Image (cartoon, grey):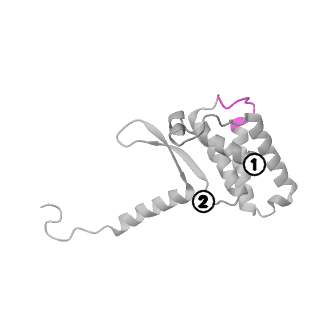
Amino acid sequence: MRLLLAILLAAQGLAMMPAIAADEGVDAETKQPTVPEILAEQRQINADLKAGDEKYLYLDPIRRRQVYGAQKKVFALLDGRDSLDGLGADQRIELFNALEQINANLTRREGDEMVCERATIAGTRRSQMVCMTKAERERRAKSAVDALMNRQACTEPGCLGD
């Protein structure tokens, strides 16, 4: 499980551009996991889940399916590769998100897993990496809906600057 955590932390650094990682204080000396290490860890977790290992008995069928689905993405992205160098930015994001989902399910951190995506900067063609937890994303979405639902209608004379 420690290796999985180290892999996830390193994968987070992989998903970020170097400038972003430097801004967030990611240590440049941190050893990045190798593809064989990531695959070995995921294969071991997969085998333990299928064998009914007691350390994963707490996982309900829905969480198990989520882990298997995320592992399927990890295997599709990494099988046949020797390094992470060949992965594009979007693939690294997908890998990070899959590993984060696996970790969240195995460590019972539902809603705390970090999800990254590319978002276009308003008014430009540029995109940037945006990462936030699922819980934070849900709070922001709810806040936006609440703001729209609760905004005051302009009923007073002159409120529109007339």
- Above or below residue 147? Residue 81 is above
Task: Quickly name the residue at label 1.
Answer: 2
> Magenta stretch: residue 49 in it?
no
From the viewer's side, name the closer residue of 73 and 115. 115
Q: Nearer the viewer, mark 1 or mark 2?
A: 1
Q: Residue at x 59, y 51 (%)?
A: 114
Whether residue 161 sits left or right of residue 151 in the image: it is: left
Percent across and percent down for residue 53 are 86, 57
Q: Is residue 99 visible?
A: yes
Looking at the rendering, the stretch of residues picked out in magenta corresponds to: 77-85
Q: Height in image: 89 above or below 150?
A: above
Q: CA distance from mark 1 to mark 2?
A: 21 Å
Give, as a three-letter code, the residue at label 1. Arg
Secondary structure type for disc 1: helix
Residue 113 in percent (x, y) is at 61, 54
Q: Which residue is mark 2?
A: 111
